[in-house]
Every structure is written in C-alpha cells, then in structure tokens.
Amino acid sequence: MRTHRIRVSIAISCFCLLWVGGFTSLPPRELLGIAPQDEGYYKSDVIKCKDGSKKFTKQQLNDEFCDCPDGTDEPGTSACPEGEFYCRNAGHIPRTIFSSRVNDGVCDCCDGSDEYNGKSNCPNTCWEAGKSAREKLKKKIATHQDGLAIRKQELEKAKQAFAEDEAELLKLKNEEKILKGLVEKLREHKERIEKAEEEERLRKEKEEKKQREAERKSTEQNRPSEESAQYQSEGTQDTPMEMNSQDSVEIGHEPVVPPENEYNSRIEIPAVHNVGQKQVADNIGESITSGHGSDDVNNEIPSGHAADQEHISGNTEGLSREELGRLVASRWTGEHAEERTNEPNDANGEQEEQNQDFSDSAEEENYDSYNSDNDEDRHKFDDDDIQDVAAEEYGNHVEPDGSYDHDKDYKSEFPGSPSWLDKIKQTVQNIIQAFSFFKSPVDLSVASRVKKEYDDASSKLSKIQSRISGLSEKLKHDFGKEKDFYSFYDRCFENKQNKYIYKVCPFKKASQVEGHSSTQLGRWENFDESYRVMQFSNGDRCWNGPDRSLKVRLRCGLKDDLADVDEPSRCEYVAILSTPIICLEEKLKELQQKLEDMNKRQPSTHDEL
Amino acid sequence: MGRLNRRSPDALIFLIFLVFLASLTSAWKKDEFRSCRQTPFCKRARGRAPNSLPSFSVADVSLSDGAVSARLVPAPTLRQVTDDDPSAADGDDASSRSLLLRLSVYRGGILRLEIDEDPSSAPTTKRRFRLPDVLLPNLDDLRLWLSRLSPDGASATSFYLADGFEGVLRHDPFQIVVRRAGSGGEPVLSLNSHGLFDFEQLRAKKDDENWEENFRSHTDSRPHGPQSISFDVSFHGADFVYGIPEHASTSLSLRPTRGPGVDESEPYRLFNLDVFEYLHDSPFGIYGSIPFMLSHGTRSTSGFFWLNAAEMQIDVLAPGWDDPAAPNAGRVDTFWMSEAGVVDAFFFVGPGPKDVLRQYASVTGTQAMPQEFAVAYHQCRWNYRDEEDVAAVDAGFDEHDIPYDVLWLDIDHADGKRYFTWDRVLFPHPEEMQNKLAAKGRHMVTIVDPHIKRDDSFYLHKEATEKGYYVKDASGKDFDGWCWPGSSSYPDMLNPEIREWWAEKFSLKEYVGSTPSLYIWNDMNEPSVFNGPEVTMPRDAIHMGGVEHRELHNAYGYYFHMATSNGLLKRGNGKDRPFVLSRAIFAGSQRYGAIWTGDNSADWDHLRVSVPMILNLGLAGMSFSGADVGGFFGNPENDLLVRWYQLGAYYPFFRAHAHHDTKRREPWLFGEQNTALMREAIHTRYSLLPYYYTLFREAAVTGIPVMRPLWLEFPSDKETYDNGEAFLVGSSLLVHGIYEKDQKSASVYLPSGASWFNLRNGVKFDGGVSHKLAVSEDSIPSFQRAGTIIPRKDRFRRSSTQMVNDPYTLVIALNGSLAAEGELYIDDGKSYDFEQGAYIHRRFIFADRKLTSIDIRPSNVGDKKFSTDCTVERIILLGLPSGAKKAVVEPGNHETNIELGPLTLRRASPPVALTIRKPNVRVADDWSLRIL
C-alpha cells in the first residue's frame, strides 16, 4: 500500500537524519513518544483507545492521523490535539509534553526528540541540563536536611511552649475562680460600708439640720450665716472628695477600673480602658484640629476628600485646566488627580483610598504613637488583635483602648509564686474579721481599706481574665499537626522593598508600611494547601478594586526569611517565606529519590553519548 | 483603629457613601457631552419643518469635464430670521450668493454630489475645508465621462448613472434623485425631497456680532462663524437603515430618532470622543465616525456616504414624521447635519447588498490584508507590568496548552508615558523579551498614542517643538492639553510632512528597543484631551493651512492611524504588512489596520451590543474589528467571561483586554472547568484560521466584511433584517451569542433557503425557522450552512505561525442536491508578495459524489509564486447518506478509507460524520476525489 510505503520512508529518513546529525537515536515509529512503562500497552496488533471509544491497528499507531480523540494512537505526532508526547531525556529527567509541541520548531525536550521532521536543529542538551539540575537538587536536599534538624528543635520548643501555655491557662482559670469569690465578698462588704456611710451621712445631716434650726431659733441675730455656709459646703463635699483623692492616687500607682466601668470589666476590657479612651478622644480632637488646619492645603490641591467627591460627581466648573485634565484621567485610573502627576509612572500601590485614609490613617498613626508610649515596641499587634476578637466575641463595639502588653504587665504584677493569691486571701480574711465588729459610725480606716482591697482585687481579676482570654485566643488557632507554627504566633517577618516595608505577622495581620502610614494587606485567614500557604484577607479596600489580600507561600529554608513580595493582580499580594518549619521529612525523601533516579540513568546514558 | 470603626454604624454609612461615590464615578457623564440642543447648528437644523426653508433652484446646468455642473441659486425671498440664528439676519449677501454644484458618475453605480461656495464671490479669504486623503487616490480612474444630458420633464435634467439606473437633477426646488431607468422610474435615493437643504455660507463678521460658543467652562472662539450644512436623504424601497458607526446599540438597524412613536431622542452623533464607560445603548458619539449609511428592504438596497469630518448629527425619521396623516411606507427618510465642511456625497445604487458594499469600497478602499498572526488570538491587559510578568503570562499559555499569538503592552511599559521609550526598570531588556516570544512564533504590540509629553528632555517633544509640528491652539501657540503623561501636545497629522516624520519614528533604529516582531496600538486618537471640551481638542485649534480642528476632528485619528501604519510599512521596507490597532476611526480606516470598540464593560449588555456594533462597523468597511473580550471595565463573572470567549472567538479581531483595577483574567485563572471552556473557544478560532484568512482575502478584494449580518447573505429573508443576535462568518458559518446568565435555551433563527448543520454534533436543522435550542455551557450555537465547504486546521500549536506546515481538514456540508462549494486562500501570511501573485487560491466543488479542487488564481496577477507542501489530512462529510466506504483520489488513483469520525478531535467527541481518512492530497495541487 502506498500510504504505508510513505510512512516507512518518512520514518527511515528521520532516522537517518538524526543518526547523521549525531543525535540520540530515535526510537522506531511505533515507539515514538511512548513512555517506557506504557510500551506494553502498545504491544498487541489491535490496540484500544484509552478512553475506550474505539480500536486501532498497529499500522495506525503514530501514522499522523488521529483515530482516538484522546490521542492514544498518536503519542509520537501532533495529529491528536489532546495527546501527549513522552521525551526520554536520557541524562536528565524524562518529560511529557503536549502533542502540540511535536515538530513545531521549538526544542522542548532536551534530547531533541520532539523535533524529528528535520526542519529544526535541536541538539541534545540533556547532559548539561541534567548536570546543573542535579547540582540544584543536591543543594535543595542539603537545605532540607539541615532545615529538618532545625525544624525538629523548633517543634520541641513549640511543644513545650504550648504545654506551658496550656498549663498556665488552667492555673489562671483556677485562680480566677477563687479571686472572683473574694471580689464578690469584698464587694458585699464595700456595699454595706457604703450603705452604712450613707445612713451615717443622712443621720448627720439630719442632726445638723436640727442643730442649726435650734441655733437659729435661739440666737437669731447673734451669728451671721458665714460660718454655717462654710460648714455646709464642707459637709456636702466631704465624702466624694475623699474618694476622688483616693482614686487619683491609685491611678498614679496603677490603672484602676472606675466604678462606672464595672460592666466593662466584666467583658474583660483591660484596666487602661479609660486612659485609652481619653487618648483616643484627644487624638480625634487633634485630628479634627489638624483637619481644619489643612483646609487651605485642600483648597490648593483638589485632593481633599470632599473636593474630590464634588469633582467626581461631575461638577468640574471652576477647575483649572490642569486640574480638569487630572480629574478626567483619574476616572480611568481610579487614582487621585494630584498623585498621578507627581509620579506618573509609579504603578505599584500608589492608589490610596483617600476617603478611608482620612479616617483611618489619622487614627492609626495616633494609635501607633500611643503604642510606643505605653509599650516599648514589640508585639504591637498582639493585643490589638486580642482586643478585636474580644470585641467581636461579645458583639460589643467598644472603643479600642490601644495596645497593652498583657504579658509584661501581668508578669510584673503577678510574680512567679502564687503566694500573692494567699496574701489576698489572708487580707480579705482579716478585713472580714475586722469587719465583723461592725459598729456605727463606720470606722473610717476599715472602710477605706475595704474599698482599696476591693479595687485591688477586682483590678487583678480583670487582668487575669484578660490574660486568660489572650491565652485561649492563642490556643484556639490551628498551628499545624505538631503545633509546627506555634512560635510564629508572637513573631512578625519583615521585608523591605524600595520605600515599602512589608510586615507579616502570622495569625494576626499583614501590612505594607511606608514611612508613618500603614496599609493593611489582610488579616489572618488560615493556612491553605496543607500548611504551605498562609492566607491574609479582608485588608484595606482598594479604590475601585477588591479588599487587599496576601498569600504567603512557605518554602523550606534555614532561616525565617520573607522575600519576593509581589502584587501580580491589583491589590492581591503574594510573598514567599522561607522557614525550616516547612522542611519536611517526606519531601526530603522525595527529593532524594528523585536524585537517585537521575543518578541511576546517568552513567549508562553518558556511555551512550 | 480603622478596623473597629469599620464595623460601627458610622463606618457603615461611610461605606455606603463610598459605594455611592463609586457608582457616581462609574456613570456615564452625560453633562460633559453636548446634546443636540446644546449644539447651536444642530438645534437650528433640527427645529426646521420640511419645506419651510426658502428653496434653492438650479441654474446654468451644463456638462463640463464629463460631469454635470450647475449653480444653486437661493430663492429671492428673505431668509427666515430666528432668534438664535444671527446668521440669518438680513443685510448679508450670504443668503443671496449662489452655490456651485457638480455631479459626477463613477463606474459601478456611484453618483457623487459636490456643493461648495463660489470662490469668485467669496467675502472672506477662508475657504471651506475639503477633506483630503480619504478617497482612494485612483478614484478618478473610475469616473465615467458623461456625454449627454437629457431633459426630464419641464424642469429636470437626467443623465446616465449605471445600467438600469439614472440620475436626475430637479431644478426648482433643487433636488437630486437616483432612480431606476425606464418607464416606471422608481426612485432609489433622493436628496432634498423634503426641502431641508440648508447651507450657511461664510461671511465677514460684523462688529456687533459675537460668534463665540460656550460649553461648560470652555469657550469656542468660532472665528469663522456659522457654516453648517444640512439636508434630508430618503432611501426608497427600504425597510431599515444601518451603518453610520460608531454607536453602541442592541439593535442591528438604526432605530428612528424622531417622528411619531419615538420617545425624545438625540440624533445619531458622529463625533469622535473618548467616552468613559459608554452606555450600551445610546445614539451618542463614541470613538469613531463613518458617515456611511446603508438601507435595505425587500425591493432594494442602497447607500449614502457624506465625506465630511466635522461634527455630524443624523436623524433617522420615523414614518409619518413629515405628515402624520400619511406615513410613508417602504421608504426611510433621514436628516443629515454637519457643523462645517462642504457637500461631497456619494450615492450608491446597489441593487444588492454586496453591490452597495463594493461601491462604497471602491470609494474608500477595502480592508488591508492583515498578517496571518493578527487574525489569531491576542492577549492584552492594562498592564503587563514587567518582563517577569510577560514571561509568566507567556509560560502560562504554554502550561495550559492555550495558543496565543500576540502579547500586548499598555501605557505603563513606557518611561513616564513617553511613547517609543521603555521603563527601563520594568523592561530592562525589551529586545530580548520580544525575541523570546518570537522564538515561539509570537509577537508583541506596544501602545503609541498621539499625546506627546511636554518634556524638554524627551527627544520626540523636542523635535516636534523645534519643527513646529504640533497642532496650534486658537492663539497660535502649540496646543497644550492634558492626557496620560500630563501636559501634552499633539502632532498635526493632517500635514503629510509630519506624517512622514512620524512614520520614521517606527524604524528599528529610532524606536530603541523595538524588533521586527513588534507591532503597534494607537489609542486615545479621537484625540482624547482630558481637560478639553467633551474630553477632546477644542474646535478652534489650528491645523496645517489654517484648517480648524472642527473641520477635521473626526479624521484626526484616521490620519494618526495612517501615519503609524505607514511607519511600520517603512520599517519593513514595504515588505512587511503593518499591524496597527486604532480606537478612533473614520471612513477609510480599514486601509490602515484593525480597530476595536473601545472601553466596554464586563457586563452582559456589553457582550450583547458587541455584535450589532461589529456588524455595523463591517458594513461600513471596517472588517477587522472586535470588542474587548471579557469587557474592559469591571470583573466579569466566570460564565460571562466564558461566554465572551465563545463569542469573541468569532470576532474578526479577537483580543482579551482588561482595566488595571480588575482582577487578573488570564484564561487559566478560573478553575479547570472554565480553563477548558476558554481553551476550547480559542482552539475553535485557531482551527478556523484558514477560513478566516480566506475571508480576509475576500474583504481585501471586495470590501465584503468577514463578519456579516444575516441579511447580507439572505437579502430576501425579512426575518433577518433586524437580527442583531446572530451573525455569519463569511457566508458559511452562523453564530448565535448567548447573552444572558444561566441561559438554558436560545431561540435561534436560521435563514431560509438553506439547511444548517450544528457544528458540535452535525445535526441538521431546517432554515426559515426559529429553533428553540437547549444551550450547554461548552459552546454557543453555531452552524455550517448546507452547500458550503470550510477549510480548517485541526492540529493545535502554541501560535498560528507554528501551524504553517500543518495539514488541513475540509468540512463539507452538503445541500439537498448533495453539492457544496468553498474556497481556500493561502499566502506567506506576512509579505506583499501576494500582490505579485504569490498565493494559492483554490475552489473546492463537491457535486455528483466527487470533490474537485480547482485553481481560481487568475493567471495574470503576477509572476511570483507561493508554494506549500501542506496536505489535506481529513475530509468530513455532512449530509451524505451513509454507506460510503472508500474514495479514490486522482491523480494517482489511490484509494482511501471512509469511516465514521468525530466533528472535532476532542476527548469524548462522538463519531457522527463520514470522514475520509488521509486523502493526503496537496492543497496547492489540482486533484479530485470520488466517493465510491
């Protein structure tokens, strides 16, 4: 048959060509593009399409006509669009390529086997490529080996830290229970004292009134009202003044929950609440003032929030020609008119959500400065996050109270031994005993002691409670099968790129910091792809775009190192974090196996060459 | 702490406010564009009732130079004075001066009417602008030398126009009629049959006059005063009118804009504008203007083209607009208004739809033959950021086995939007980058816009300034407007010297970092001027020879496109066909490259309007056009994106594009299932490339568009006249879009007179019936017409250039008499050698169970030859009664098998069609194949 003859002659001519050219010998037509493990499948005279759709004869194998829509009959040609071609790549790694690559003029297989029609010259580069691939693989294996050792140590530490934290939580919960009881007792006493004091005051008042009445009656023209007015004022102000002075002393000493915040303390707002609130209020005041101050600036450059809205909504009358140009340009770009011109070709992250920034960054900045006042530096995000979650949990939108290092604070106040609890117990015992000799009028020293002890104890209680919530919040997270990522909880990783510093705090949030302004790239979402990716989502919103998000891909490395932060799609960031935590045993074995495979085929193929 | 705030009620309100703002920003800014009412010439003209104007009468009719010449003499009555029309004030001689008229006839059924002022009596030195460079330079060769005028009744003159047609000039009142010759004298086209012809002649300005016009904060000095022209044109025997792109509309035909039953509407506006987020259904002007209208009805097809680049407004008048008591039947009246220029208009007599298209093409030219790669799939985004991004996207296509041919770089690739430069941080090795793509047969496109950054250190700006090459403002200084780079100026592309200078900039030497595989995209060439009136250049800006911008506005982008295209032509020493995509268009733009429908949006409506838009562009000569697949603004839902690929794969110009605020949209980012669907859509296009390329050849020769409305092929099937949901690719393929989310079925009308084979499963459907078809997600309804043969290449490659040597598949759909025909055109895909005959053009004819391939390349086309070893690997037969087992190929008398095979070589494709296995005949040869 004519066709058969043609086919054979093509095969032969290809064969010769390659032979003469000094390339690896081409397998016979019937074996072209077939993986060794598949050769058996093609042995018989009538072969089935792998999808079962039909059968074909051995003559139809690689005959440049697609019989099986799935490509079974044309593994070595481009005839079936959905077929695959296997390159042996002796000296390197075998590869399967799409049929569309066969004889397309591009050398896809390092052994050149995909280009056999004589139209292109594809030298065999497998040996060279294989060599460098093996080098790379060896390096990777070394990294994995060393990383694995570090990982093991880290895991030990993580386990220990986890156990410690769990134990502490348990202990704290017990203490909380006891302390709660004590506080309750103290509160009862305090209330009784207050009641007694109130009665006493009323009684006194009555007496005084009576007395004055009597006095007035007896000596009507003797005394002018001077003294009595003075007396009166003293009398009414007496008690509150005393309490106030007490409070203020205590504030100097340590923060205290003022009485009106009793509810709040129940929902575990740390004691600095008030101070924080005040600070925020001040800052708001400040930002309002500065807002006024910058009005002029806003008028000059139409960047102000209000100005922008107006323009965007179509009122362009009265703009200078340049402003108008910028404004219209900004419709397409979503950027703000004046930013464009300053840096017209700065593509990355230059869009700022002015509207949001106006409220956001002003506050954030203030918040930051507050942080650094109260809290040396680290773990800014810790409490921040806890606060958040706490607020979320209770569905209560309380004003944030700034950052507060529970840990430090807590430890300084509750030093190692648990004896403090006994001390309090003892004190309360004493007071209660002292108090059982209850008599009227109230013994002022006892009363103030009760109040002080009550304040002390309830403040301690709220601290314990906040510590508990912090710990339980931490322990709630998914740290991996072996608590692999436990140490990440209190850490942030940074990467500097041009003017930006990228800051990734696992389990908390990620941000892009430029000078004093910070853009949130996302809040912790979860691990993905079986702990190979950390997801941060719902970051600051992009103008005309999505909420920012960040995907951190983990890679085995000897040090924790954040790198390659990128924004492949608008406001969707990616980064790579090298860490020994992800240097896994299985992966190491897999790599070693791969190297072994490569080495195995190495000597024989080299001989062939 | 913004995070907490955001949850508070205040923050919520704030957010809602932001959303509100965003919705404001995304709305089309109606106020920024002039309505007819805000445009004095339009308002004046539109306010006139038929026959209310003092009429012109014709005098001194004579033959001169083989053409009819005459004077138009205004009626001696005083012209009506209207409040807002100072030009009509008495005491001016403008209303008493006569106009010069000339009628000339061109071969093939074309009548040209020219009316201008009489320079001998002109009161000013200003001459009205006649737009050069649009009509084909050799048009005069087609002119017929009239030798005889015949009196026609008491006051009319008639003359020969074409076989079966004659032109008539009625004297008083002046009127032009094109009619069928003979006793009936049935009219086809008429001008001024409703007495709306008006011509504001130039005159000297009086001291107390103020000609300024204000719009928003802009003042137009209008130094030459009112000079508008308006007239009515009637299309007799027409049911619908089409054309005058570019407008976004869901309707294929032009809906009436005035008259009984029409809600208040603007006229169709032809004024090239960069419209942010244009509406999907509006008569307002967008990026392009082609003042060519066609009419079609059961009785006739005709066309009218007014060569004028000033702002134009056109009313389509509903029946009864002139007399509600007696609505005209079988006629469509239209009313044309322009701000300036002259009357230089062409009447095309038809009589068939393709005749009108050929007639128009003989005046303005045909589609330039594109390079083959340009017909394949283009991948674009604002912006592929840097070389790594480019490499990653390129690799992504390979990884997912999706072919593409061209990767595009938008404005941010340049250094500070200084076109012809590279941002060297992002693109340090542009040549290497292009060469890497070229190694896989791929190409790159960079953007070059007309706004040049006013930066003294920018060589282009320096040169242009020194040479005085910029458009001037009204005061004579270089016009300075705002666009992407900030303060910018615009080269005066009307000037041929400046176009030459511009063209040189594309040489490989001058365009540093360019390589021969780099092609060009012209955007923003309306021109877009962010701080100009209506986001464009002021009308009183000055071009070469004192021509005002108002007089050539609609052609600015055309000249820019022309200059760029010539630049690429020069770069390749006249051997490499240019590829330049332009956004702004005018009549004739087809000669310079491709165009697209601008910044559309990722919504279903915009998917829908893409079809009527592209069809009307095609009717107006622009064969090589497409809409941004996926929609430029916004993020398409997955199914919308997939549907868009499925439809876009049939656009003549097939490009995906997206705004930089949108999520990344490369076809593999939406899950495996969607990747497979988009891959399939793109593969469909690639396998049809031989068919498309053949159609582009047809468009280049005849002007018949690649993508056609159904009525173009089925002119007597009334059901097709206003069908804008389906279209034909060539004459053989019918495609119906899916324009709704979750659409489960579609009602598809298949034209009468033919049967249709479903392209997926080979099922045969009757024509002349609307079929309700179930719709699956894997394709949109597509059919091959019975009686046709479509050439395909079914092997997949990375790019079209790698398919050059691949074998063909012929798909033969037999009609009732078991016959079919089709064509295949092949050349080298890139050079102009085809002009010397270096091409293969075959016709395949199937009849009497025999398929024959014959050479239809004329022998006198040139000495150059093109050859190819490509063979036919497979022939699929639809509609042949089964039973055939073998075929015999001649010459050679060798037998080949026939078996049942699939229509497409995809996994799980069922065997549904008789397939001739491996005939292995060369496409370049004569051969025949007999079915046994």
Image (cartoon, coloured by chain):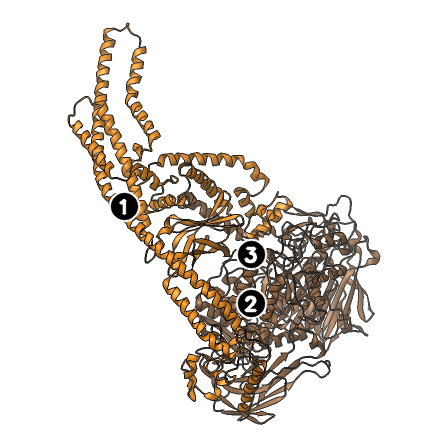
Chain colours: A orange, B brown
Q: Are marks 3 and 1 in contact (CB under 8 Å)?
A: no
Q: Which mark is residue A168?
A: 1
Q: Mark 2 or mark 1: which is in front?
A: 1
Q: Which mark is residue B139?
A: none
Residue in the foreground of this view, choosing between A141 and A100: A141
Q: Tell me, yes or no, if residue A563 can be seen here.
A: yes
In terms of secondary structure, where does tag 3 sit?
loop
Q: Position of residue B258 (x, y in %)?
A: 60, 60
Q: Which mark is residue B611?
A: 2
For label 3, count other residues whose C-alpha is less than 10 Å away and answer few (under 14), some (14-19) or many (20+). some
Q: Looking at the image, which residue is at 51% across and 64% down? A: B666
Identify residue type, mark 1.
Answer: Glu
Residue in the foreground of this view, choosing between B164 and A237: A237
Q: Which mark is residue B277?
A: 3
How far apart are the alpha carbons under marks 3 and 1?
A: 61 Å
For label 2, count other residues whose C-alpha is less than 10 Å away and answer few (under 14), some (14-19) or many (20+). many
